Image (tube, helix red, strand yellow):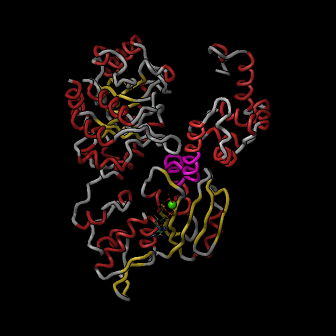
Amino acid sequence: MVQRGELRQIKGIGEALNKKISELVTTGSLPYYEELKAAVPAGLGELVRIPQLGPKKVKALYEKLGITTVGELEYACQENRLVDLPGFGAKTQENILQGIEILKRYRGRFLYGDVASLAEEFTRSVEKVKGVLKASLAGSMRRKNEVVKDVDLVVAVRDGKAIGKGLIALPQIEEVLAQGETEIRVRLASGIPADLRMVSLKEFPFALHHLTGSKEHNIALRGRAKKMGMKINEYGLFAGKKSIPCQGEEEIYRALGLSFIPPELREGRGEVEAAGQGGLPDLIDAGEIRGAFHVHTASSDGSNSISSLIKEARRLGLSYLGITDHSRSAPYAGGLSEEAIRRQLKEIDEINRTYKGFRIFKGIEAEILADGSLDYSDAVLAGFDFVIGAIHSHFRLGEKEMTQRIIRAMETRHLTMLAHPTGRLLLAREPYQLDIEEVIKAASRLGVVLELNANPHRLDLDWRWLKYAKDHGAKITINPDAHNLQGLQDLFIGVGIARKGGLESHDIINTMELGEVARFLTAAQG
Ligand code: DGT
Ligand code: CA
C-alpha cells in the first residue's frame, strides 16, 4: 500500500502516520522510533509481558514508582506499594504477583514451533561436518514436547577432538557457551541453547536413548532392566560384565523384551509396561491426515483467498478444507455479517463445482457467548456444513460457570467442534478455569468433536488429556487454525502432539477420506 500510495485510505491513518510508516517501509528504519525506544527503559518491554499488565499500567508503575524491571516490581508488590497506587489496589497487586510467578516459570523456555525447523536444519548441518558419522536430535525436541528448554544433539564421530572446530563454525551458531572434548554447548540463532554430545558409533544408540529421555522414561526402563538382571546407561546395555551390542534403539528395546517405543511416548506415563504387554497404540502418522478444518481466509483475519488455500492444501496431499472465518461478535477479527456469510457460502458452492476430488466444507468459528449461546440464529447456523464453537471473551468466569457455558454451547444442536478447549496460550496465558473432565465427557455424550488446535502457541487440548478423551469415546480433530498458507503446515506439529497423547488414526476425524468425512458431518449436523 505504501508503494501504491494507498495508506491514507485506511481510516485512522493521517499524514503523520503515513509519513512514518512510509519511511519505515522504504528505508527499513525510522529514527523517530529509535529515539522513542531509547527514551524508554528496556525492562519495560518485559513488564508488559506479565499477564494482567498492559502498557498503561506499566507506564504508571514507571512514572509513579520508577519501576523498570520485573525484579523491582516483584519487590514493590511484596512491600505493598501498589495497594494505594491510583488505578491499582490489593487485588491487582496480588494478580500481578501471580503474573510474575508465571513469567518466571516461562523464562528460558521456547515454543517447539518456534525452534523446530532451526533445530532440524542445524542437525542436518552437523551431519555434514567432516568426521561426523551421524547426528540426531534427542531430548524434549525429539519427544516433540510443546515447550522445550534446549536442543539436545547426539553426534557419532570418529575422533571427538578433531571435529570441534568444524562444528563451532556452523552458521546457525550464535555463540559458543562451553567447549569440552565430548560436549559442546552453544546458543543458536533464535536464542535457544544447544547441547552437542559426541560419542562413538558403538555408543550412539545408547547415548541417543539416554539423552532422548525423558528422565521418567529412563528410570522406568532402568527398573525393567534391573528386574531382568541387566543394566542400562548412556554407554551400553550390560548383562553382568558382558556388554550387549545394539545397532539401534529397536534392538535395545528388543533386548529388554519390549516393542519399540516411539520417542513421543517416552514420558514415563506407563509406556514401558504397555510395551511389555504388546499394548502400545498404533500412533497416527502425518501421512494419514486427509484434510483440515478451521482455516481462516481474507474474509475475516486470514491472509489468503480460498483458491490459494486449496492450492497449498493439495500440495500437502490433502483432499478437503473446512473454511471457518470468525463470527460477527468478533469484530476485532473481522467477524462476518450475515450478508458476508451469504456471499461466502455462494462463493464456496461455485468453487466446489470447479474441483474434482477436492472439497471445501462450509464452516464458521462461532463465538460462544457468555451465556453459552452461539452467535447467529439456528437458521443461519443451519447453512453451514459444520460449526466450530470458540471462546474469545469473558475468560474470567469461575470454573463452574465456564464449564456450564461450554456444555450449554455443546448442547445447541449446531455445534460440531469445540475450538481450543482450554484457551491457553503457551508461555503466555494460563487455561481458563474449567472442569476439563466434565467437558470431555459432555463432548463424548453429545457427539461434539474436540479440537486439538495445532497452532504452536496453543496445542490445545493438551496432549495429557488426549488419552482421557479417547478412553471416554470423544473424537478429536487436528485443526491448523491457519491464518495463512504457512499455517496449514502446523497440522504436522499437531500430529506430533496427537502421537504424544497416544492417539490412533481412528480417533481423529480428519484422517477420514473425503466421502466418509462428508457423511460424518452431515450426520453430526442433522
Ligand atoms: P528440556 O530440555 O527441559 O526441554 O527437557 P529434556 O527432556 O530435553 O531434558 P534435558 O535436556 O535436561 O536432558 C535430556 C535428557 O537427558 C533427558 O530427557 C533424560 C536425560 N537425563 C538428564 N538428566 C537426567 C537424570 O538426572 N537422570 C536420568 N535418568 N536421565 C537424565
Ligand atoms: Ca533438552
Task: Say if 75 sits above or below 331 in the image.
Answer: below
Q: Quadrant of residue 474?
A: top left
Task: Name the residue rendered at 43%, 23% in the picture.
Answer: 326
Q: Quadrant of residue 274?
A: bottom left
Residue 376 screen position, x and y as percent: 35, 16
Q: Quadrant of residue 385?
A: top left
Asked whether residue 322 is in view, the answer is: yes
Q: Residue furthest bottom?
A: 241
493 in magenta: no
Asked whether residue 489 is in view, the answer is: no
Q: On the rendered image, what quadrant is the C terminus found in?
A: top left
Relative placement, left or right, of 131 versus 369 is right
Task: Name the residue rendered at 33%, 31% in the picture.
Answer: 406
Task: Name the residue rendered at 75%, 18% in the picture.
Answer: 16
Residue 386 screen position, x and y as percent: 30, 26
Report the front residue among 66 and 89. Answer: 89
Report the front residue among 26 and 13. Answer: 13
Relative placement, left or right, of 507 versus 311 is left
Q: How many marks?
A: 0
Task: Name the residue rendered at 43%, 18% in the picture.
Answer: 328
Q: On the rendered image, what quadrant is the N terminus found in?
A: top right
Q: Kindly report the secondary structure that dominates the magenta region of the rendered protein.
A: helix
Report the front residue among 511 and 130. Answer: 511
Residue 282 screen position, x and y as percent: 26, 54
Which range of residues does the magenta coloring cover?
100-120
105 in magenta: yes
Task: Say if 337 sits above or below 114 in the image.
Answer: above
Residue 229 screen position, x and y as percent: 30, 82
